[in-house]
């Protein structure tokens, strides 16, 4: 494990060293020293003979990883859209101005600061996260006056949580914590970008480590109260913590009920829940009192904004591999039903599913219309924390509802029945045809020796019985362009009607890839109902090429 952690530190180190040599030679010198440390630790991990000596090597590996993360932060701390939004929120807090419901369009437009486009043809320019990370960044922003205030908070949170996890884990697992948290090139880049989810992760680490011990003997004690407060603070930092909380509460009640009986188990779980809820409410109270409606819409924004499709999940069937779908909403329904099904399965089969309780919440995102890998990998340290400190034996006496005549194969059938509705919804979304039938007539031009389109004449036929409001964009590979301008054509296409649209790309020119690279597609999306139609943009004729 020590050797694997050491190897993981190589990932991404050379690009950092190359960048540092051109801009910050001193940082490059530190990275070179880290290279020496990696080599020495790799040799010592195979040479030392005692557990104490190996633990010391593990500590050096951790310190080397911390040094590399700090060097990476010094080289890249400008942040992306999440960091920029959090820094702006921190600035608003410092000046006593409202945070939620306030659009900040001037923050966007650069290659680093992307915009979350919505299926209704717009984009979100407001802060859409709970306030804790912005609150922590506010005093830092008073000194730094830049996005670095937010990225410093998230990077510090990652480092602190990594060191904490290292100390909390049993000795044989400690280097695994170094690799998962700071190696492999995964989480540090989210911290440099200023993701509030990293703050939530840091707060969830003490919650998850040995979590079945909370409330043992019917008393929360200082440890249980601290875990509950950290859970509430995590929920006040980023919405991903919301999905883990119900699984933890179900598991905690089942374990305690097996030990204490129903009444005392309910009492201790209620105290745990109340502590978490009060902590979360305390962090949100000022903002809710300042403008309850704006605050509520802000913290719920990622759940109901209907952002444009993105990610590696099953929604890719309709986005990448077919001509679209007229029932994209069913991916969302499937995701919600899967989450409920997993919660029900956890309640019914906690003795079997308990060890995987920190993994199960993220499975539901694979069915969502926004299913990018960040939702999965940012919480992977929690998987490790549970694997190392919560053995299957901890659930041996946990309470489960009695299911007469449900044994063996019947349990598998019941579990499958809980998950089947979600799969049915996904199947409906995947096999539904696109709502529009589109034919394209592009107009080509050459700009700076590149061939592209300036206008596309689109003939669209609404094949459904619902009025649609289409919005157009282009796609090459994954990700969509900025919205194209509809130069002419109806805003609303009536049921079973057809229309001619003349659409222009943002900036007046959309370059097409040459050679045998990926094709370029025109997509037409609608927000209510959520639909997408995809049509391939023909290649330019040889005379233009």
Image (tube, grey):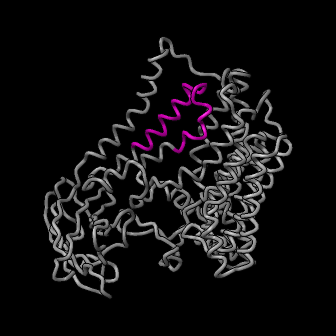
Q: Position of residue 102 (x, y in %)?
A: 54, 72
User: Horizontal placement of 421 versus 342: left or right?
Assistant: left
User: Horizontal placement of 135 versus 375: left or right?
Assistant: right
Residue 80's quadrant in the figure? bottom right
Question: Which residue is depicted at the point 72% across and 38% down?
Answer: 272
Magenta residue check for 360: yes
Q: Position of residue 93 (x, y in %)?
A: 67, 71
Residue 434's quadrant in the figure? bottom left
Q: Position of residue 123 (x, y in %)?
A: 43, 69
Q: Position of residue 493 (x, y in %)?
A: 20, 64
Up-down relation of residue 367 to residue 198 (above or below): above
- Screen quadrant of the C terminus: bottom left
Up-down relation of residue 404 to residue 300 (above or below): above
Q: Which residues are magenta?
A: 334-362
Question: Which residue is depicted at the point 19% across and 79% down?
Answer: 443
- Screen quadrant of the N terminus: top right
Question: Which residue is depicted at the point 13% across and 64% down?
Answer: 498
Up-down relation of residue 412 to residue 499 (above or below): above
């Amino acid at each position: 494990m020590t050797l694997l952690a050491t190897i993981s530190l190589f990932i991404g180190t050379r690009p950092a060293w190359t960048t540092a040599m051109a801009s910050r030679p001193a940082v490059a010198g530190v990275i070179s020293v880290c290279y020496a440390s990696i080599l020495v630790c790799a040799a010592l991990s195979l040479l030392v003979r005692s557990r104490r000596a190996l633990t010391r090597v593990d500590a050096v590996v951790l310190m080397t990883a911390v040094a590399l993360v700090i060097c990476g932060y010094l080289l890249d701390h400008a942040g992306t859209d999440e960091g920029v939004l959090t820094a702006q929120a921190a600035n608003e807090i410092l000046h006593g101005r409202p945070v939620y419901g306030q659009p900040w369009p001037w923050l966007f437009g650069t290659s680093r600061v992307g915009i979350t486009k919505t299926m209704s043809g717009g984009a979100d320019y407001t802060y859409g996260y709970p306030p804790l990370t912005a609150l922590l960044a506010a005093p830092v922003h008073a000194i730094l006056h830049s996005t670095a205030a937010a990225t410093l908070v998230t990077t510090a949170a990652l480092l602190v949580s990594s060191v904490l996890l290292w100390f909390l884990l049993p000795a044989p697992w400690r280097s695994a914590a170094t690799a998962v948290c700071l190696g492999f090139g995964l989480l540090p880049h989210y911290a440099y970008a200023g993701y509030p989810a990293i703050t939530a992760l840091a707060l969830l680490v003490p919650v998850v480590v040995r979590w079945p011990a909370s409330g043992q003997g019917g008393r929360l004690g200082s440890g249980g109260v601290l875990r509950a407060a950290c859970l509430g603070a995590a929920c006040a930092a980023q919405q991903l913590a919301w999905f883990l909380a119900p699984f933890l509460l179900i598991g905690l009640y089942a374990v305690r009920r097996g030990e204490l009986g129903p009444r005392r188990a309910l009492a201790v779980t209620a105290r745990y829940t109340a502590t978490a809820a009060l902590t979360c409410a305390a962090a949100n109270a000022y903002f809710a009192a300042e403008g309850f409606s704006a605050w509520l819409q802000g913290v719920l924004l990622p759940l109901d904004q209907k952002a444009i499709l993105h990610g590696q999940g099953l929604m890719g069937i309709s986005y990448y591999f077919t001509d679209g779908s007229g029932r994209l909403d069913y991916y969302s329904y499937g995701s919600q039903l899967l989450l409920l099904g997993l919660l029900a399965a956890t309640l019914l089969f906690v003795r079997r599913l308990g060890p995987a309780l920190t993994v199960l919440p993220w499975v539901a995102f694979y069915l969502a219309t926004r299913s990018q890998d960040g939702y999965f990998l940012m919480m992977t340290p929690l998987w490790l924390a549970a694997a190392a400190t919560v053995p299957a034996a901890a659930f041996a006496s946990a309470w489960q509802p009695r299911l007469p005549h449900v044994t063996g194969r019947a349990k598998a059938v019941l579990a499958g029945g809980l998950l089947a509705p979600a799969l049915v919804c996904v199947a409906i979304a995947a096999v539904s045809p696109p709502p529009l039938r589109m034919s394209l007539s592009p107009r080509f031009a050459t700009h700076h020796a590149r061939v592209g389109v300036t206008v596309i004449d689109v003939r669209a036929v609404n094949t459904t019985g619902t009025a649609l409001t289409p919005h157009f964009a282009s796609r090459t590979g994954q990700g969509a362009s900025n919205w194209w301008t509809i130069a002419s054509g109806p805003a609303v296409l009536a049921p079973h009607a057809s229309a001619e649209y003349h659409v222009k790309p943002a900036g007046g020119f959309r370059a097409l890839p040459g050679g045998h690279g990926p094709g370029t597609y025109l997509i037409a999306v609608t927000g209510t109902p959520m639909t997408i139609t995809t049509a391939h943009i023909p290649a330019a004729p040889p005379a233009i090429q």
